[in-house]
Structure formats: structure tokens, C-alpha cells
Amino acid sequence: MKPEKLVELIDLLAGDIDFEYNGKHGAVCPFSRTDISISYGDDEHSHICIEDAMNDKMFDGKCLNEISDKIRIL
């Protein structure tokens, strides 16, 4: 999925977005537009906006903007 579509999905605040990337489980948990948690394997980071969450390079040195077309939504 294109990064813009993932941003739209996160912005809906409809629930957690679970995915797989490089054989590891990842998730985006948008509690609100100013409280977004992302996880990958055993790591978890919190962010105060979607843009920060999309640019966090916690996914094997890449960010969601770079890997959005390679993730498999679960």
C-alpha cells in the first residue's frame, strides 16, 4: 500500500493495524491523533503525530514511508 493510504488508515483511528515485515510482527496503534504507538518485534515507540510515526526508522533501519508497499497487513 502506498504511504498516503497507510496515513489515511492510521488517521481513521479505527483500531490497531497489525502487519508483518521481514518475518517480524509490527503494529501501529493509533489511540488518538496525538498518541500513536508503533511496534516491531520487541521494540515499541510512542509518537505525538502521524508524521513522526511514519518517519521512525525502527523497521530494520527503515520507516513506514519506505516499507509501506512491502508490509503484509494481517
Image (tube, grey):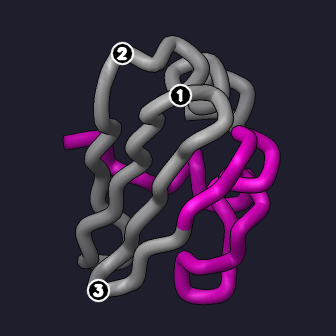
Q: Position of residue 2 (x, y in %)?
A: 66, 33
Label 1, on which residue?
A: 32
- The amino acid on which the numbered mark 1 sits, given as a three-letter code, is Ser
Give the Cα distance between marks 2 and 3: 24 Å
Say few, some or many: other residues with alpha carbon within 10 Å of mark 1 (under 14 / 14 to 19 / 20 or more): some
Residue 15 place in picture, x, y as percent:
30, 25
Residue 31 appears left or right of 24? right
Q: Where is residue 66 drawn, in percent x and y? A: 72, 60
Residue 47 at what x, y percent from top left? 65, 56
User: Which one is nearer the viewer's eye here, 14 or 72?
Assistant: 14
Q: Quick check: 5 left or right of 70?
A: right
N-term-proximal mark, 2 vs 1:
2
What secondary structure is marked by label 1? strand
Amino acid under disc 2: Ala
Q: Residue at x 36, y 15 (%)?
A: 14
Bounds of the magenta segment: 46-74
The part of the image, by quadrant, that contains residue 16 is: top left
Kind of residue sitting beneath label 3: Asp
Q: Which residue is mark 3?
A: 42
Residue receiving disc 2: 14
Mark 3 secondary-structure assignment:
loop
Dot placed on the residue nearer the N-terminal end, 2 or 3: 2
